[in-house]
Image (cartoon, rainbow, N blue to C red):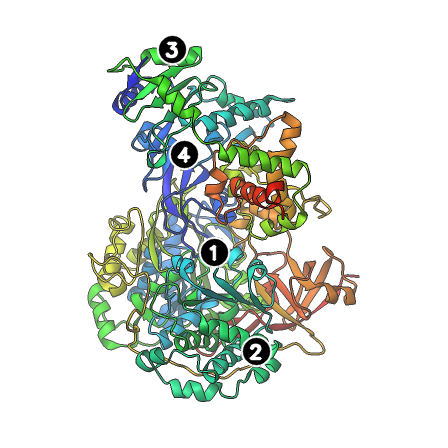
Amino acid sequence: MKKTLTTCPYCGTGCMYYLVSDENNKITGIEPTANHPVSKNWVCVKGWNSFHFVNHPDRLKVPQIRKNGKMEQATWNEALDHVIARLREIRDKYGNDSIMFFSSAKTTNEENYLMMKLARAVFKTNNVDHCARLCHASTVVGLATTFGSGAMTNSISCVDEADLIFVTGSNTTEQHPLIGTRILNAVQKGAKLIVADNRKIRLARHAVLHLKHKNGTDVALANAMMNVIIGEGLEDKEFVANRTENYENLKKTVEKYTPEYAAEITGLKPEEIIEAARMFAKAKKAMIIYSMGITQHSHGVDNVKSMANLVMLTGNLGKPGTGVNPLRGQNNVQGACDMGALPNVYSGYQKVTEENIRARFEKAWGVENLPSNVGYTVTTAINAAAEGKLKAIYIMGENPMMSDPDQNHVREALEKLEFLVVQDIFPTPTAKFAHVVLPASSYAEKDGTFTSTERRVQRVRKAIDPPGQSRSDWEILCDVAERMGYKQMKYKNPGEIMDEIASVTPIYGGISFDRIDQLGLQWPCPDKNHPGTPVLHVGKFTRGLGLFCAVEYKPSMELPDKEYPFCLSTGRCYFHFHTGTMTRRSRILDREERFPFVEINTSDAKNLGIRNREYIMVATRRGEVKAMARVTDGIVPGVIFMTFHFEEGPANLLTINALDPEAKIPEYKVCAAKVRKIS
Amino acid sequence: MKSLTITEIEQFLKSVEPEFDLRVPIRLHDGTRSLGGLNEGPLSLMGGKIPLKPTSVFFPQTERVFTRESDGEIKMEKPGEKPILVVGYTAEDADCLEFIDKFFSENFRDDLYFQKRDGSVIMVVSGKCGPDGGFLKIAGGKCDLELICDGERFIAQAYTEKGRQLEKKMKASKEVGDIDSLKKMSDELPDDDLKTIQKASELILAEKVPDAFWVEIGDRCIACTSCNYACPTCTCFEVYDRVHDGTTVRERMWDSCQLDGFMREASGHNPMGTEDIRTRRRIHHKLAADVTRWGHLTCYLCGRCDDACPTNIGIKSVSRMIVERYSQANEK
C-alpha cells in the first residue's frame, strides 16, 4: 500500500488528495488530505472517483501508425521517426506556419511549457494554443486589458469573507463543487447571494435574488446596474478617482442603459435590476464569481470587461472578500495559459511581438529568429485547416471532435489535414483521424505541477507506472525535439523543467519543487523568498490604473427565429468532465449520467407532447442530434440545455462556429435550435 | 500492567512486523494522519481518530472479487499472506467494527470482508491522546488490546487471547499505571452528542420531522458522497466487470445512497429521485430504520461525516437541528 499526495485532474479548484495504490501497480482509491487550505478533508464526487479511469482497459498502450488507411502498432522509434519525417516534409513544403500544436490544460505546466518551446524554438512557429480558447480566452483578454492580469483576482478562501457574492454564468456547486460549498456556507453565515443565470441551479435556491436574464444579455444587465449605481451616487468615488482611468467614457456609455431599457433586452423587471445594483454597491465587500456563462459568447470579452467595470466602479478590488473571480474549468487551464501555450505570448504572458522578449527567449533557449507573428488559435486553426491553409496538427491531450463547435466543420478540417498526430491516454473521436497515435501517461503516472484557478502552483506526483509502453507527455516532447536535432530540451525530471520555467518567467520566478513540496504557492511569486500572492492588485493594478472599458450590448450571432424557436445553451453536468474520455470510463460517474440529455421546460415539453426521458431530436442549422428529454422547471421556457460529454449525442454537432473577434472563443451558450418528437 | 512509551510501542510494532500486515497511525506527506505501514510515514499515536473510514482496512474503496481467464477458469481472490494488525481505532471505531462484523455475517457471509477480517487483531488507542490534548473514550473491550494513554505513556490492556499473546511481546520500561482514574475520566466524558442523536432518533420515529426540513437539508447536499465514504458503518458497494486482454475482472467499489443512480430503476424511475428523500434516507437509516432492524442506533458518533461534509449536514449537525426545532421542549 502506498499513498501519494497529488492534485485532482478535474476542475480548476485545485483540491489535493492521496492516491492509494497497491503492490500490483494499481490505484485502489483515494484518501482526502486533512491539511489543504482548499480541500481540507473534503472531496467532491469526481474527486472520489478520479482514479477509476486510470486502469481502464481502453488505455492506449502502444504507438500506432496509419498504414493503408488502417492503424497498425509500431515501436516508439518508428512512430517518432515517422512524426519527424512528415512534419519536416510539411514544413519544408508549406512553411513553418503550416503546422499547429495543440497543447493541453489537462497536462502539467512542465508539459505545456515544453509544447510551446517545441513549437517556437524547434518548429519556429507561434501556432500553439490549447483549450483555454474554448473556456476563458475572454477572461485572459478582458482582464488583461482592464487590470493587466488575466486571472482570478482573489483567493478561494475570500468567499468566506465576502458580504455579497454575485454569481453569474457559473453552476458552481456542480462545476467547482468545493468552491460552491464555500458559497453555500457563506450564505449560512449571513452573506447575501445574487445569482444571475436563467437555469435554476442549486445556488439559486439559496439566493436572495435570482436574475433569470436572457442568454447573452449580460452586458445590458451590467450596464444597467452601473447606470443605477452612478445615478444614485453609490459608486466608490475615491476608488474611481485614485485607482482607475476612463471613467467618463463608462459613465457616458451606461447613460442610456436605464433599468427599463435593459429590462426589454434582458427580460428582467426593472426593479430586479435596481435591487441587484443597490445590493451590490452597498455591500461592504462584494465579489463576482463567473464562468462560462460570461465567457462563451461572441461578445465574451465585452462580458468580462463589464464584470471588471462593475467591481472597479464599486471599489471591490485589491482586498480580501472582493474581486473578479473567473473560475477556471480545467485542472491546469490557468497553468497552460501561464506557460504560454497561447499563440501570442511566451510563459508569464510575455508577448511574442516584443523584440526584447524574443531576444531573451532566444538567449535562454539557444536559438535564433524566434517568430514574431501571432499564431493561430485552436478555433482559427480548425478554420484554416478546413480552408486548406494549415496542413498538420500535433495534438497533445485535446479532443476537438468533441469540444470544438460545429462538429461537421471540425471533421472536414481534420480530414483535410495532411498529417495529424494525436498524443493521448484514450482513443478519442479525434484520434480516429490521426496518422500517428502516441500513448501518453495519465496524471497518476507522472510528476509535475498544475496551477489552480486561484493561481496556486501545486505538485502532481507519480503514484504508479504508466501502462504498456505509454510515456509521459514531457518525455515524448523531449524525444521529438531531440530527434529534430535540438539539444536544449533534455531534462532528468520535471523539477528541472520547472527550474527553467522559473528562470524565464517572472511571475513563476520563485517557484521550485522544493518550495511547493507540501503546499503550493500562488503567483506572482517573483523570487525564492516571496510568499506568493493571495490577492492581486492591492494598492495598484498590474497595469497601473484600472481601465474602464465601456462596452455596448451586442446581440448573440444566431438568435431563435420562427424555424428554430429555441435558444440552445451548452455546458457540463456534475458527474462528467468535458468530452467524457475519463469520467465516462469511471464506473460510478458514468452510471449517474449514462445518456445524452436535453433539458427542456415543462410547458415547452407539454406544448410539443414530449414526455420526460423520451428520446427526441434536437436540430440546428448545423445538424441533428438524438437526446433524452429531461423535462424540468429548472430551465426557462424557450431555452434548452445540453452537455458536450456524449460521443453518441454530441452537443457540439449543433453549436455555432461564431467567434468573439478578439478572444476567438466560440459562442457555445447561444444558438437557435428546434426540437421534435421521434415518430 | 505494562506501561509503554511511544518509542517502546514503535519497537514492539517493529518486532511483530514479520508476522503482521501492519495498519498503524502514521503521518502522510503533508501531515494528514492515516493508517499504514511503518515505512509509509512516522508513527502518530496522538491526535485521536484517523480521518479516513477506519473500516476501509477490511472494506476498501475498490477490491477485486474474482478474475475469469479467457479459457473460462475463474480465480477467486486469495487472502493476504499475513493477518492484519490495526492500531489506532478509537472506542467508537471498535463499536462500528463490531456492527459491520455483524452486518457482513448476517444472512449471507461476505467472504471478501472476512478474508481480511478473520485473524486480524484490533488495538484501540484511548485516554489522554485526543486532538488538542482531549480525552478519548476508553473502549474497555470490543477489541483485542487497548493502549490507554495517561498523558505520557500507554497502558496496555488485553481483552482477548490474541491480545494477551501480543501483550506478552511488549517490552515496557514500566509495569504500573493508574488505570482506574483514567477509566473514571472516561466514564465522566459528556454524552451530549449521544443524547442528541437519541432524541433525534425518537423524533424521526415519531414522525415529528416534516418533509420541509429534509428539503432544506437536501438543498445543501451537493452529492459529494463523502458522508458515506467516510462513515465506518456504511457498507454499500457497486459491482462491475472490466475486460483486460480477454481476462474479465470483477471488482466492487464503494457506493453512496446520496447518488441518483443508487436506486434508479431500469425504466429511469427513481423512488429516491430527489436530494431531500436521499438525505432523509441517509439520516433515517442510521437513526430510525436500523433501530427497528437491529434494536440500536448504527451511528456511533465518530463524527467523520460531520468532518467530511463540506456543507455541515453531517449526522450530528442534522440531529442538533432536529432536536432544536422539533423536540417538545423547543416546539413553539
Determine the CA span between mark 4 and mark 2: 53 Å
Disc 3 crowd, CA 10 A, few/some/many (<14, 14-19, 20+): few
Do the dots labelled 3 and 2 sit on one chain? no
Q: Secondary structure at mark 3?
A: helix
Residue position for label 1: A189
Q: Nearer the viewer, residue A246 or A313?
A: A313
Q: Secondary structure at mark 2?
A: loop
Nearest to N terminus: mark 4 or mark 3: 4
Q: In this image, A336 relative to A570: left or right? A: left
Question: Which amino acid does the dot numbered 4 rest on?
Answer: Ile
Residue sitting at x 27%, y 22%? B5
Q: Chain of mark 3?
A: B
Residue position for label 4: B50
Question: Which amino acid does the dot numbered 3 rest on?
Answer: Gln
- Of circles 1 and 4, the one toward us is 1
Q: Which mark is residue A556?
A: 2
Determine the CA span between mark 1 and mark 4: 28 Å
Residue A617 in view: yes
